[in-house]
Image (tube, coloured by chain):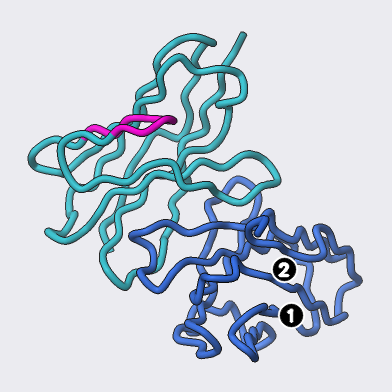
Chain colours: A cyan, B blue
């Protein structure tokens, strides 16, 4: 399983764009990159997944460079309700979701 | 369908007692997973089922932990002779048989406190 490294915590202010970068140097050819969000006292929630280049949905964008050794989750115009822990995961077919410590994002007014 | 349901939401038990948690997955999901999460850490995988078959259980923390999914629908996680170190949030998730690449849906968890 590819190991991921992401910042332990980040602070931001309402209305700003937040970019959380994750490194996954030993990602395998068939691995996907997935991000989950977790609020206190709730289970993690799937945000976005990608293989290469850029993926966008109604919640976030995911940027993956050509070498795929890192990825960046971009949250546009964050609000207080985006305060949560964000997990970057790398997984291949048949693997279980394996979580690291995640990035604790604090959005301030 | 309202998602993955876990009961109870909170459980306080005395050390040495047995506890059982229930998980009801999304009805069309045939895979079901159990995770444990301690304060400040990410969820830790415990075991998973495809239908009624338990396909991975080597990560169960000790032989005091067991899980069942007798009819391929709901699942139970039992902890026997609880210890204070078992205090944690126990999370259940479900997915289709395409597995992790297509997203897991997690429940809100059962928070266990062993006193």
The residue depicted at 47 percent of the width and 38 percent of the height is A86
The residue range painted magenta reads A56-63
- Circle on res. B79: 1
Q: Is residue B7 left or right of residue B58?
A: right
Vertical side of B114 occupied by A103: above or below: above
The residue at which mark 2 appears reads as B86
Residue A55 part of the magenta-drawn span: no
Say what secondary structure mark 1 lies in: strand
The answer to whether tags 2 and 1 share a subunit is yes
Residue B101 placed where, x, y %?
33, 60
**N-terminal-most mark, 2 or 1:** 1
Residue B18 placed where, x, y %?
83, 82
The residue depicted at 53 percent of the width and 70 percent of the height is B28
Say what secondary structure mark 2 lies in: helix
Chain letter for the residue marked with disc 1 in the picture? B
> Dots 2 and 1: beta carbons under 8 Å?
yes
């Amino acid at each position: 399983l590819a190991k991921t490294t992401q910042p332990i915590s980040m602070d931001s202010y309402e209305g700003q764009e937040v970019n959380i970068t994750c490194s996954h140097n030993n990602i395998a050819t068939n691995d996907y990159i997935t991000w989950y969000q977790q609020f206190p006292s709730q289970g993690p929630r799937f945000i976005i997944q990608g293989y290469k280049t850029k993926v966008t949905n109604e919640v976030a964008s995911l940027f993956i460079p050509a070498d795929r050794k890192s990825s960046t989750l971009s949250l546009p115009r964050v609000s207080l309700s985006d305060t949560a822990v964000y997990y970057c995961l790398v997984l291949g077919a048949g693997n279980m979701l394996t979580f690291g410590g995640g990035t604790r994002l604090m959005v301030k007014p | 369908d309202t998602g993955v349901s876990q009961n109870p939401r909170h459980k306080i038990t005395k050390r040495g007692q047995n506890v059982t948690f229930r998980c009801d997955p999304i009805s069309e999901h045939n895979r079901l997973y159990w995770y444990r999460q301690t304060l400040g850490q990410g969820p830790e995988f415990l075991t998973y089922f495809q239908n009624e078959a338990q396909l991975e259980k080597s990560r169960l923390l000790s032989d005091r932990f067991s899980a069942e999914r007798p009819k391929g629908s709901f699942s139970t996680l039992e902890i026997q002779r609880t210890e204070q170190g078992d205090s944690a949030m126990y999370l259940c998730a479900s997915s289709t048989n395409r597995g992790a690449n297509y997203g897991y849906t997690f429940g809100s968890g059962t928070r266990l406190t062993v006193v």
